[in-house]
Image (tube, rainbow, N blue to C red):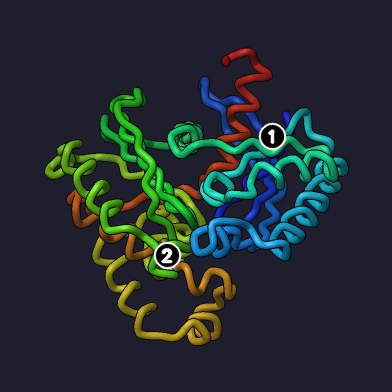
Amino acid sequence: MLFASIDIGSNAGRLLVATVLEYKGHAITDKVTLVRVPLRLGIDVFEKGEISYQREELLINTLKAYKQLIAIYNPIDFVACATSAMRHAKNGSSIIDRIKKETDINLNIIDGLTEAKIISEAGNVDMHKPYPYSLYIDVGGGSSELSWYKNDSLIAVKSFKIGTIRELYNLTQKQEWDALKNWLADLNINGKEINCICSGGNINKLTKLYGSKHQNLLSYQQLNKGLKFLKSHTIEDRISLLGLRKDRADVIVPAAIIFKQIMKWSGIKELHSPKIGLADGLIVELYKKHKGFN
């Protein structure tokens, strides 16, 4: 069964077209195509409170292109969602109305808790989890979503206004860091053997560069070593030496800092990055809806 999803984040927009299969009672997504556009909506929103006309035009044109691709692939169904930047943009509602008028796409703005739950559902698709406790971490451009599970049952979930775009422009409030630290302390993770499952393009790239890319694992030591290397080089160096895209070369350092801080405060020694994200979770939700699971 073929489905499509659109994820409009603070850093980029993504169109995912994927086939969903069932194996041993689990839904398994198989990517057909992924189209990513560096919209950078968060740069406008977190600094000025609204999306500029230029970025609004880029968003509209991106969604028009996505709609054409969806028509070509002809999936059973598709869904479109927006996250942190659109949540906080003062002109978000008017842009949503324009999107509907010009593209006929219903772009749904979801809150941080919903985002976290959808992402963690994607993580439950087809993944070996040797320990009963699991912490899901998604670091985006405008926010970080964390979900705490025991035996696949959700215990706690929280969204924090800590993201790569916010960090890049020094827009993260100290109280958000304090809230994250206290939330992790309340979970009492230290000393527990847990599955730490992470999502987002930055953790995938960090794992590929410095971790075990075949196992999709990244240790604290590997992350710290990689962060030191990245911080010691300019954005231009990161592009030329590591082959990073420009819109990845700048935000990868803030992402590494966020993941490192979470690992430090929680005592987590290793991250698992199975290349999942909100777009995957949205497709799993569509599949469940069409199978009558929801």
Query: In the drawing, does residue 267 fall left or right of residue 222?
Result: left
At x 68%, y 60%, the residue is 37
Label ID, residue 197: none
Please name the residue that numbered disc 1 is placed on.
79
Please state the horizontal and vertical placement of residue 237, each as a whole percent of the image: 49, 86
SS for tag 2? helix
Counting the numbered discs, the total is 2
Amino acid on which disc 2 is placed: Leu
What residue do we see at 76% from left, 59% from top? 57
- At 31% from the left and 25% from the top, the residue drawn is 151
Q: Amino acid at mark 1?
A: Val
To which quarter of the image does residue 147 belong? top left
Q: Is residue 109 left or right of residue 255?
A: right
- How far across and down, in percent of the image, does residue 17 sit? 71, 42
Residue lying farthest left?
191
Q: Tag on residue 206? A: 2
Disc 1 element: strand
3D distance between C-alphas at marks 1 and 2:
29 Å
Looking at the rendering, in which quadrant would you find the C terminus? top right
Q: Which-is-in-front pick, marks 1 and 2?
A: 1
Front one among 181 and 261: 181
Is 255 on the left or on the right of 149, as rendered?
right
Quarter of the view holding residue 252: bottom left
Residue for point 79% across, 34% down: 75
Nearer the observer, 50 or 165: 50
Q: Quadrant of the N terminus?
A: top right
Instruction: Identify whether 6 is placed above or below 232.
Output: above
Residue placed most toward the observer, 104 or 187: 104
